[in-house]
Amino acid sequence: MNKIKNSLKNKLLFFIGALFIILSATLTYYFFSQAKKIMEEELVQRGSTLVRNLAYNSKIGLKSNNKQILSEVIQGVLIEKDVSYVIITGKNNEEIVSGVVNKDKHLKEQLPYLETDNFGVKVSPFFIGKLKFYDFIVPVIVKNEDTVSDEDIYGLSGIDNEEEKSVEENNTKPKEVITGYVRIGLNTASIYNNLSSIRKVGILIMLLILVFAIIILYVFLEYSIGPINELAKVAVEVSKGNLSKKIEVKSNDEIGILGEAFNKMIHDLNVLIGKVKYSADYLSELSKKVKITADEVAVGAAKEGESVEKTGSSVDELNISMREINEGIDSLSSSTGESSSSISELTSSIGEVNRNMVNLTKSVDETSSSITQISVSVKEINSHIQELFQTSENTATSMVQIDRSIREIEENTKNTLELSKKMIDDAKNGKQSVLSSIEGIEFIKESFVEIVNAINSLSDKTSTIGKILNYINDIAEQTNLLALNAAIIAAQAGEEGKSFTVVADEIKELADRTAHYTSEVSGLMDSLDNEVSRSKTAISKGETSIETGINLSKKASFALDNIMNSAKNSSERINIITKATVEQSRGSHEVTESINSIVEKLKKISYATVEEEQGIGRVVESLRNITVSSNKINTSTAEQSNGSRQIMAAIENINEMVNFFSRGIQEQRRGIEQILQSMMNIREISGSNERNSNSLNDIVEELNNNIEELNNVVRYFKLEEKN
Amino acid sequence: MNEKNIQLAVFSVGKAKLAMDIMKIREILKFQDVTELPGTPEFVEGVIDLRGLIIPIIDLRKRLGISDKEYDKKTRILVAIISGQIVGLIVDEVHEVIRLTEDEIKPPPKISGSFSATYIAGICDKDKEIIIILNYDKLMSTSEIVEFEKINKSLISGFGKDISKSKKEKKKTKKKKEVKKTKKKSIEDENEQD
């Protein structure tokens, strides 16, 4: 299968994928630029607050010019997040104290000089290398250069208030002066770090979504545009002439409808090509037949030509002889015509012979043509008979097959009959065994009743034994109690009762043993009771099983009866079928025989037509003989002519008469020439016949060529396989 | 046989196996219906008639604070003499009479203040089973004994029997004599009934 490189699916996939990538990239870029902006604004806000706080905190240090306080304050700021450096300068912008975060230490030399502002926080971003910093400068303002009151340090409630106040004070009170400046640098590196980590995650998510979307898109396109590919492939196949392909229509959309229409078209094309092929085959058959006929016609024309040639040669010979006759008559005319009467007779006889000859030739020609026709029709009959023969032989072979299958059916029905008989026997046997099993089950039922009776009496006896056991138990207990009391009394009797103690102990032991045995017996009785009740339930279950067994056996017996009846019915039907098949077999035998006899008769007819043909051959032969005899007649006339020459010598005198006669002969000669002319005409006609047959052959040839071409064209199409 | 041998009647109340000196026991009876007696203290179940002798009955389960149990054919009444008074004790079952030397009896665990500690005379280990030997005289408090005396007196006087000698005699030997007398009488009664 050839793959379509620039398929619609790939184009769509590429286009929508590219669109999606551009969209997602734009969105991502917008999102990150916004995030960066917000974070930087936040940083600036924070830096402003920090620097104001620092300014406020460093007032005292600046006032007293105490570096230690200032550096402590700076340390406090340096630990804040993102703070890169802190510088506190004097009022003349000279550095008093500075601190740089360790990681930014090397940057200190690169810090740009930034203009200070006397009012408020001045924010100025700058770059060192790729790193972006925000620098915040704020002036430290106090009321008086000499003294710093508590109010200056602590009295202000907020930084903003202080700023406002300092501005106000600067404007109104000249005493308030700037003691120094505080400068803070904030590093934006953390923002970029955060952004880059967020960016990584964001890009990853975008990629995932992209891959997912492309997969969904691919599946969708595969589903929706896939059938078009299929359609295209099948269309290519059809354009190559392969009509056996079909499109599997899966969907109900336009593509599905297209596929169905395409299938319909292919099917119609199949039918059409099939019809064309059939017509071409038929035409081919016809052209073969026409060719055979044309060949026959050609053969006939050739034969006709030959016979015309022969006739012509005979006429030539006749002419020659006529000339000889003429010469003879010339010589005769040179002699005196004595025997003019005999010559006239001779001439007349020669004329008669001549006439007879013409008639004979004509009749021979007619006979020849009719015989040719007969021959052609006989050939046709023969070909028809051959076809008939073929057909009847085919029928005979099919009859033989039918006969064989009928015999097989007969065999099978016989087997089936035997099987059904066997089945009846089996069913009888089965019924017998079912009846005997019912009897057995009845016997089991009776014995079950006996067992139940026995178990019931056993149960009664066990309960009696239980009662007896209870009595024994009571006695044992009583004995035990008596033994205990005896032991007590014996103990209280002291030394005198000691011997009695032994007796009391033994009595107690006996009582205990009795109790022990009775409890054992009672346990045994309990288990016996359990067994009895279990066997009772088992028996009741067995009884129900027996009932179901009997019912089932009866049902089985009934079913076996049914089987036997149906087997008998089927056996009867099989008998009928057997009879019918035997009759059928006989009938088919008869049919086969009659067909065979037809074949025999056809063979005979075929032989007869062959004989007929041979007879026609013989007729043609005799015609030739006739021609030969007519030639002989000619020679005899020549002899006659000789005789007449002899007579001529005798009758020179009657030359005039002979001359007159000669003129008649001249006329005769002209007549013969006319005959010759007509013979030439006939020859021409037969030649044209031959040419016509040849052209017919050519036409048939051409027709064959055309049919062959048509067949080739049809063969180009691979038709769908018919089931 | 050693002179220090003690004979004990072993019985059970609840899950506990208890023992009692055989010399304190007069008789072991099958359980018989107890007649409730109005006006008696709560700890007295009622009375039974033992061959003409009316005996107050105490349920030892109640006494020892064990939950009630229905009486069955193993239930026995131990007729014993406690602090000179004849009392019938209802127990779950009486097992046997065992003989012990005094060495085998161990002293009770010291749990001061509780009632249980007072009525346990000792503990012994018989066939890997702990048997608690009861101290009879501690089974009832003095006031209860007085109550009993009253009951016994009233019962005796009620039946008009002449046991006036035994009213003030609290010595055990004399009690034994009285017991012998009553026993003889009861035997005589039985003979008469037979």
Image (cartoon, coloured by chain):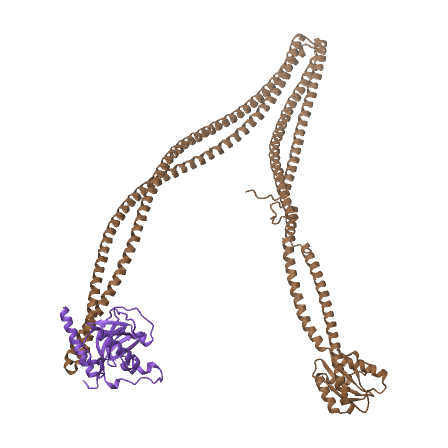
Chain colours: A brown, B purple
Image side of residue A161 versus residue A471, left or right: right
Residue at image point 46% right, 33% down: A399
Q: A17 and A126: which one is in front? A: A126
Q: Position of residue A555 (x, y in %)?
A: 33, 44
Quarter of image, res A341: top right
Image side of residue A606 versus residue B73, left or right: right
Q: B78 and A417: which one is in front? A: B78
Tell me: residue A464, above or below residue A51.
Answer: above
Q: Position of residue B28 (x, y in %)?
A: 22, 74
Placement of the N terminus of chain B among the 4 image quadrants:
bottom left
Could one spot residue A582 in this view of the protein? yes
Quarter of image, res A212: bottom right
Tell me: residue A617, above or below residue A64.
Answer: above
Q: Position of residue A325 (x, y in %)?
A: 67, 16
Quarter of image, res A454: bottom left
Query: How many numbered circles does the render carry?
Result: 0
Q: Position of residue A592 (x, y in %)?
A: 44, 31
Placement of the C terminus of chain B among the 4 image quadrants:
bottom left
Could one spot residue B129 in this view of the protein? no
Q: A629 and B174: which one is in front? A: B174
Image side of residue B80 versus residue A78, left or right: left
Residue at image point 37% right, 39% down: A416
